[in-house]
Every structure is written in structure tokens, then in C-alpha cells.
Amino acid sequence: MKDAPGTRDYDWLLLAILAAICALGVIEIYSATHGSSLTGMHMKQVRWLVIGFVLMFALSRLDYHLILDQAPALYLLGIAALVAVLLVGHTRFGAKRWINVPGIGELLQVSELVKLIIIIVLARFFAEVRSDQLDLRDLIKAGLLVGVPLVLILKQPDLGTALVLIPLLVVGAFLAGLQWQHAAIFSLAGILLVGAVFYPPVSRRILKPYQRERITSFLHPEEDAKGSGYQLLQSKIAVGSGGFWGKGFSNGSQNQLGYIPVRYSDFIMSAWAEEQGFKGVLLALGLYMALLLRLVQNAQRAKDRAGMFLVMGVAAALGFHVLVNVAMVIGAMPVTGIPLPLMSYGGSATLFVFLAIGLVMNVRLRRFVN
Amino acid sequence: MSYWFRNDNRLPQARLAIASYIIVGMIGVLLLGFWKLQVIDADKYSSMAERNRVRYIPVIAPRGRMLDREGRVLVDNRPSFSVLLLRDDLAQVQKHLSSISEGLDIPLDDLREQLNNTKNLPKFQPIIIKPDASPADVAFIESHRSDIPVLEMIPVQRRRYLPGGFLAHVAGYVGEVSEQQIEASNDKLRPGDFAGKTGLERQYNDLLQGTDGMRRVVVNSVGKEVERLSTQEAISGKQILLTIDYDLQQVAEQSLGARPGAAVALDPRTGEVLAMVSHPALDPNDFAVRISANDWKSLNEDPHRPLLNRAIQAQLAPGSVFKIVTATAMLEDKNPPESFTTFCPGYATFYGRQFKCWVYGKSSHGVVGLHKAILESCDIFFYNVGMRLGIDRLSYYGTKFGLGRKTGIDLPSEEPGLMPSAEWVERVFHRKWYAGETISVSTGQGAVITTPLQLARMIGGIAMGGVFKQPHLLKDAPNVGEERFALSEPTVEKITDAMYGVVNEEGGTARNVRLPGIEVAGKSGTAQVIGYATRERFGKQKKFEDNAWFVGYAPRRNPEIVVAVLVQESGKHGGEAAGPVVKDVIKAYYDKKNKKTQGQETAESKRPPESSKVPVASAVRVPRTAGKPDESAAVVPVSASTDPRR
């Protein structure tokens, strides 16, 4: 197998879309934090973006088949890291999600890395399924592969990241030839589970108090004036009061006066929508749509099934992030703590996205190679 | 390539196309959601953004009052207003800045600087631009409510101290908390809060300080309160009952007058501080609000050191008062024996150097025994005794009597003084003790330095037969520290008889302190601020006058009251300058006691009715820090005894 991809083979359109989204993020982080004690946060984000770009190019040089070769080892490594977090991890904001990486000094959120590993592992697993029809045995095997890390992440607790693993499985199974009757059965099970979560007598047994509180406040925001219902309400007020044209850069009262919760991170879309209005939202969501469609296009042109599964795994993760985060911002979903890819401030999350895009580039670079 | 890989390029193109449609549909649905909020319901949310501004406004808890031992109010609160600048709308603030500066009489530059310093705080947090609004300020704000919307007032409680610096050093004062205080407070204090800075305000800050309440209000676009949602009431601080007797304090303040110095009155039976005065004093009401950096600097650099609480911080040579230590050591050690006498020609030579008696050049004491030596304060006698005892014994007794270490009074920043010893010069100066130094120390000169409080505690304790109670200011404090150093009965008898003689017998140095019907005893001291030799060179300038001491008590044995008075640079003999203050305080004590026993009207019956009902914090330990000899002696320079303002 030859391996000589040139710069011409990179997906420059994809990179342009990526850069545009990052720019919107940096602008809004600046607007949300300048003149406050968080001044300078946008520059920290730029630093993460630069590191991300470098990692992305580095990962794209390494043939993805070699990475898929190591899938079982990566899987075990991921599980071990999650167990390590539970044992010796750092607790922040009431959850054990971080681990101190010696030499780097930064606290790494392990579950972000695990998302990437699960994308790789599922791509390898589904690529090995030889038939066009995914039988029940393989489906359950794939479910177990995802189930173990999912439970470990839930234990941290980090409901948001745990949920991201589910669309990876769903999209992978769908493309691997999921049969309609299986889809129907699992949809029903899923609906029952979601129903149970919203049904207090059951949710009391399976959810943490703060998770139940988020559900309650999502269903009845007005009952919870200062908790997460308040956050959702303030976010909706911010978005709504932005109107079609927006209040202008660094001019949103909800944003500038600090009513939007974590306005530079999980709720950055809220700040953006307040200051840039519906026209700004159109631009941002347009860019995300372009990004996701471009990913699907890359999957369609992949050289083999393994590459296609890799790219679609990335698309599923990013799409789910966008859906859940933006729906939360407009008050259509409870607060889950899922950031908006590339716009929200955050080191581990930004690195995850760039590494994921690195996998996509990897597949694209090798589409003609044979 | 590994076993699992087969060039498998069957791609599910149909299902990938479905994925594309799902993506477009998802973004479309999200956009619909935004359309509903931002276009259809935009007006509704705009008005909610305008209205929905919930603020938390602190309700400041009043500090606890300080009452004297009879419940009379010493430190109180008064209502006041703080002026707030609302910064939600900075454009509005800028627009009105100059009229605010004019109306409230704040320099424009000051306002700009305050805005600049606080630009990192969330904009919905108002800043205090004037902490104590005058009636004119209040009128200005009220009359401009509509046209200057960025001003607001909040009611606060300010400290009110007795005027003219009465009890100023004991009470201390409050001020805006420092960074260190915030850090040490475990999140209890925030910037801008007030807390005790000195004195009892600082010592008992945790008690005096209440818990601030919180008001939840809705504010409009400039940050003004338009609706109150809920209020969490503030909890006032506890009031504290002090051992201070207002009447005695007043007598002590007046009797000391304008002279720099200090007076401390203790009940040696309990350690209760009945009065404590330090002059010059400042009026703490001036700091109750805010003090400018310039004023603060000039106070700190004032050569009269008005911020110093001389009763616990002035470390000066005790002079002849120290002879009581030398005398007690002599009697206890029987070295020289009790019958020891010496001849005083007005001077004597030790180790090749001439030492003078205070009567040198005027007269001489002739043949002197212990009793007469204390009465007439003969230096020559004590030089000889000191020489025989040696520094180790003097230092041993001095330390046992509490010199060179803190008394543990419940006030911050007490100084330990210094009781020199051979071990001390070794440690600090890395040299041997010179025998000649012992001669100076035996009469309270040289390196030995003490505070007025230490001397009051020492003389009171010796007259009690060797029971030293920890001085304290909080009434009814449990666990008051006590040190016992058993002195033999004959020793105590001879020493107290001699101190009685100082006041009441022919030849005593303080016969002016005599009070008919009261057994007043005591010891005078006149300490050189600088050596006599230097003084002769410079002439008799005021700057080098002697410090006058008198420590008096009554009755002769097991006293009820001991008063130590220091008058700095009086140029007079101790009994002459400081004695009358002691006399006045002891007289006031007995006058009051006699009135009380005769059932006449006293302050007890005049007590303000409301204060007696309020519960008083008493479950507080007086910190027990006294005990370690030589504590921090190393930091005291030896020259301290010759600096008049130490």
C-alpha cells in the first residue's frame, strides 16, 4: 500500500468551515468575558485551537488502518483510564472527571478521549461485520462494547458525555445494516427508558439528585427560580430578546450583566444569539450544517467501509453535540453539560474535536490510494 | 494489513443519503426554535430581559455594643446611609459623573479612579462611592431621583464611640477589611465589609460582628430596585460587657490629661482591667467611616505616636519600680541577708565605673537598710544588692513576675518588654554579660524595659502574696489565667510595708499620694530616657526629660485595686508627676465603693434600662498567651529603653 498523500488532498473546504466556526467562538468568548475577571479567556481558547490544529495534522499523517489495528488495545486503555479516574481522579464541580497527566500539567478530561476511542473501536467492529444485514448477536456485542465505558462515565457522574456514546452506536448500527424490526424494538426500549427518567417514581432510583433536579426544572422552569430552570429561562430570555438583528457585539445585557450561565462555555450559543440575533444564528447553524454535510460527503467518498464508519462516527458525535447543546440553549432540552463543539471554551473538548477531524482527514487523504 | 482488513468498499450509499437528510432536518428544526424565540416571541422576551433582573442586596448587620461593667454604653451604633453608584449602564454613569461629583462633593478624579478600580467586578454589582452620606447628600439624591437614575442609598449602621478619644485605644476602631483579613476569615468577609482593626473591636470581632442578611429585589435597566422579592433579616452582633468602670476611666483620662503617657487600673484579685488610658489619643469616630491614605500616613508618622496604646505597647525602663523585684529577690534568696545595710554617699564605684544615686549632688542617704532604701529609693543600696544577687537571680525573679513576656490581656498587639539575662545577650549579641550591666538593671535601668500593664500586674501580684491573675477586659470571662509564685509571708510583709511607707511614712518618695482612711501603698520610678552623661552634653532640653512612673495600690495587703501610671518626659520625679493620677483613681474607687455600701445612688441604679435586658456574650475564653518567658525578647533592640517613644 502506497502512502503519499499531498497537501492538495486535504479537505480545505472542511478546514475553512472549521476555521469560521472557531472564529465565531473566539469572538463571542471575547465579548462574554472582556472587562471581567475572566479577561483574556479568548486567547487561551486560541491557544487550544492552535494545539488542536497541530494534533489534527499529526493524526492525519498516520494511516487510519494502523490506528484501527490497535482498536482492542485502545479500548482497554480507555477502560483503564476511566477506572483510574474513578479511583484517583480530580473532583471539580462535584464530579470526578479529570486526571492529572504528568508532564503536561493540565487536567485531562478522560471521557473526551474515550469518545474518540469508541469511535475507532466501533468503526473496527462494524467493518468486521461482513454481511449487509446486522444480525442481533452483533448488535448486542456492539451494545456491550459501548455499554461498559458508558456505565463508567455515568459513575463519574457525567450524563452528558455518557449520552454522546449512544448516537455513535445508533449511527454505526444504522449504517452497518440495522434491520427495521431490531430498530423498532430498541426504539421502544429507548422511549421507555427516557419515559422512566421523566417519571419521578422511577427516576428517583436511577438518577443523581442534581440530575433529577435538572429534569424537574426542565419540565417546570418557573418552580426553580435560581437552579437550572432559572438558567434555561435566562438563556431563553437572552436568545429571545436578541430578536432578528441582535443587540450588537458585546452589547447583550443578559450576557454582559452575567445572567447567562457559563456564557463563555456551555451557553455560548445563547450569548451569540442575544448579541447577533437570528441572522447570527442562521450563520452559525448554517456553518454547522455545512460541516456535518461535508463530513457525510467524505464518508460517501471513503475508500472502504472502515473509513466510512470512522467519518460517520465523528459526524454522529459532533451532530449530537450540536443538537443537544443548541436545543438546551433554546430551552427545548434539559441542561446536560454538553458543550457546543469549537465555539464553547474548553481544552479537552476542543482537542477532541480536532483529533476527530484528524481522523476524517486521514480517511480523506487515503481515498484514492490503493 | 492485518487479518481483519479486506478491501471492502460496499458503502451503504442510501443510508448515508438518509443521514444527510436527517442533518438538514435537525438544523431546520433548531432554526425553527430560534425563529419562534427571536422573531415570533421577541417582544415578550425583550420585556422579560428588561424586567427580569434579580439582585441580591446585602442587609448589613449592626455590630454588638460594648458596655462597661455596670452596663453603661461605651461603644454604640448610629444609623447612616451609604451612597451607591449603579454601574449597569456605564453610558448613563459617564453622562452623570460630573453632576454627581458636584452634588456629593467628591472630586471627579476620585470617582474615575473608583470606577477604574472596580471594572473587573460584574457590572450589576454597585459600588459605594460615599460611605457616610451627609444630610445634604441625602437631600441631593432624593431630589434627583428621576434625573440621575444611577445613584442609590442603602441604610447602614456606623460605629459611635465616646467623643474625644475616651477609651479609644481599648475600644479600637473598625475599618474596611484588609486582604489578609478576608483570607483569614474563611469566606465570612468580603471586600468592602467592615471589621475591627485594633483594640477590642479586633479582638472580639467574631462576637461583635453579626451575620449580614440578604434582600432579593428586582431592578430596572440601570440597576434600581423596582420590586422586593424576599428578605433574609440580618442577625446583629452580640454585645460585650467589659470590666472597664466608666467612672474610673473618666477620672484616669482627666487626671492624666494632655500629658503623653498611660494609666492602667487592675483588680489584682481577678485580673479585671478597671481603667486603661493611653495619651495622646485620637477620636475613633474619625475612622468609623473611611480614612484617606494621606491622613493615615500622617497619623502613622506623627512623632507623638497617637496610635500606640502605651498601656500595653510602651516599652520603657521601669526605673525604681524595678527595685521591688530586686528587694523581693534579696529577701527570698537571703542574699544579702535582710539585715544588710550600706552607706550612701550619693555615688559608688562598681567594676571601675562610677554609678550615681539620684540624690547625687543634692544630698546623700547615709546608712541605708532595705526599708529605708525602698522608702527613699536609694540607688546605692540596690546597686550593692544587685551586685550580690547577680543577673541570673534578678532575671529569674523578673521573669517569674511577668517581665519580658506578654501578660496575655485580651487586646491585640501587646508588647512583651524585655527582662535581660546572660543567656539573652549571648543569643542576641553573641557576647558575655558584663557585670556592670547588672548594676544598672538592679535599679530598673539598662536593658530592662516594661509596659505599664506589666508593672500593674507585677506589683498587684506581689502584694497578693505571689498570685498573678491574667489581666482581661471581658467581664465574666471564664478560664482567666493565673500564675502562682509563692512568696514567703515575711517577704510579702516587708515589701508591702515598705511600699506603704513610700506613701505614708516620713521620707517616702510619694507622700503626696496619701489618702486619709485608705491604706495606699506603691513605688515610684523615674527612668532615664537617655544616659545622664549624654544629657549633660545636650543640656536640659525637654526632649531628654525623665519618664515618671508610679505604681500604687490599696489596701496594703491583698489589694482591691492597683494602678500603674506612666507620664512620659515629665521632667519630674515619678511620685510627683505620676503619683497624683494614681491617687485620683484610687480615691474615685473608694468614693464609689463607700457610696455603694451606704446605699446612695450609683451608676448601678442609673443604668439605661434597655441595655440590662440584652444578653451579653460571656462564653468566651480570654486567650491565654501569658507564660513563655523571654517570648520574642530577641526582637526588642537594647536601645529601646533609651528611645522616648518606644
Image: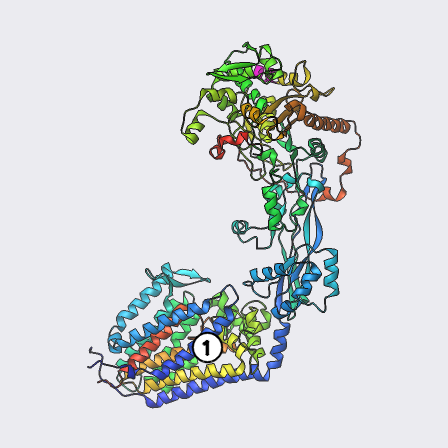
Query: Taking B120 as reference, is B27 above or below it?
Result: below
Q: Give the image location of residue A112, x and y in percent.
A: 37, 70
Quadrant of res B44:
bottom right
Q: Which residue is mark 1?
A: A24
Q: Is B95 left, or right, of A72 in this rendering?
A: right
Asked if residue B490 lies in the magenta stretch, the reply is: yes
**Viewport quadrant of the C terminus of chain A:** bottom left
Locate residue B551, reporting x and y percent: 63, 25
Regarding residue A350, the answer to whether it shows in the image is yes
Number of marks:
1
Q: Quadrant of the N terminus of chain A?
A: bottom left
Residue at screen point 39% across, 87% down: B20
Circle 1: residue type: Leu
Segment colored magenta: B488-495
- In front of the other: B640 or A184: B640
Main secondary structure type of the part rendered in magenta: helix
The answer to whether residue A337 is above or below residue B451 is: below
Q: Quadrant of residue B564?
A: top right
- Measuring from the top left, give residue B452's x and y in whole percent: 60, 30
Residue B102 position in % (x across, y down): 69, 61
